[in-house]
Image (cartoon, rainbow, N blue to C red):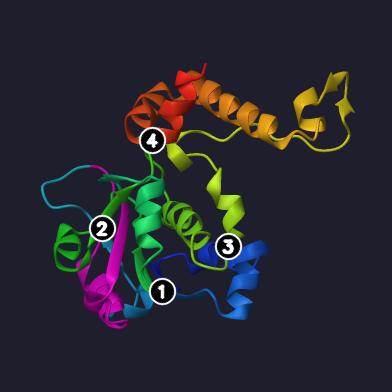
Amino acid sequence: MKFEIVTLFPEIIRGFFQDSIMARCVEDGRIGFDTIQIRDFAEDRHRTCDDAPYGGGAGMVLKPEPLGRALDSIGAKGKRVIYPSPSGRLFDQQYAQELASEKELVFVCGRYEGIDQRIIDMYVDDEICIGDYVISSGEVASLVIIDAVYRLVDGVINGDSLVEESFSNGLLEYPHYTRPSTYCGSSVPDILLSGHHAEIERWRMMQRIQKTKKNRPELLEKAVETSEEVESFLKTL
């Protein structure tokens, strides 16, 4: 899978691809990436990429000409183009799984008040919101989406590690413990030391349900409606 990121600040992007699991994926060829500097496509001597909005208002807007030329340079109209924006569709795990099936994704990183609407109309396939809040960096928002997507690509993460993560079966993940068995007077639950795998699985499901009920009750309600496993488990309580 390849990610192409159109940005004014490529250095923010590059560091992410050079560390940890992502770096190994890039090295073995599972993941590819490229950054496209928007300023390289500005034609005035100041390499201007933003201007004041028509109609007035605070802030600046990324100009369509350099951004359009940057997108044309990578043939963006033939690829799936994503623009992270508070005005977009809310991002979730199911959306990440959908995007993970693509061979290439192009990200347009906004700044200031955003980008000219004509670029969205002409190039963007997915306008995505990562949450109900506003941040100043389209690069950071793009990396949130990329991180959620690339780990779902075949071979990146052990499949068993993905099965019981938060949002699988609509539930949040159960708590984890490791050595030592006692830390600052707090002990690991006895069930996890018992070796009874069926009881451990039951305990973990209970923890998932309790955490979801506490932190995201709307998810539990949906999980009961859509997951026979969750509905069946709740009937045994």
Q: Nearer the viewer, mark 4 or mark 1?
A: 4
Q: Amino acid at mark 2?
A: Asp
| Residue 13 drawn at (x, y percent) | 51, 64
Q: Amino acid at mark 4?
A: Ser
Q: Which mark is residue 137?
A: none
Are circles 3 and 4 on residues that touch, CB within 8 Å?
no
Magenta residues, start to end: 58-84
> Is 163 located above or below residue 4 in the figure?
above
Q: Nearer the viewer, mark 2 or mark 4?
A: 4
Q: Is residue 122 visible?
A: yes
Are circles 3 and 1 on residues that touch, CB within 8 Å?
no
Q: Residue at x 25, y 42 (%)?
A: 58
Count every numbered label the image shows and give the total.
4
14 is within the stretch colored magenta:
no
Q: Earlier in the sequence, mark 2 or mark 4?
A: 2
Is 157 displayed left or right of 37 in the figure?
right
Q: Which mark is residue 126?
A: 2
Q: Residue at x 25, y 80 (%)?
A: 72
User: In this orientation, which residue lies closer to the viewer: 84 or 220?
Assistant: 220
C-alpha span from label 3 to label 4: 35 Å
Q: Which residue is mark 1?
A: 37
Q: Which mark is residue 227?
A: 4
> Is 131 located above or below residue 217 in the figure?
below
Is 65 displayed left or right of 2 in the figure?
left
Tag 2 secondary structure: strand
Q: Which residue is mark 3?
A: 16
Tag 3 secondary structure: helix
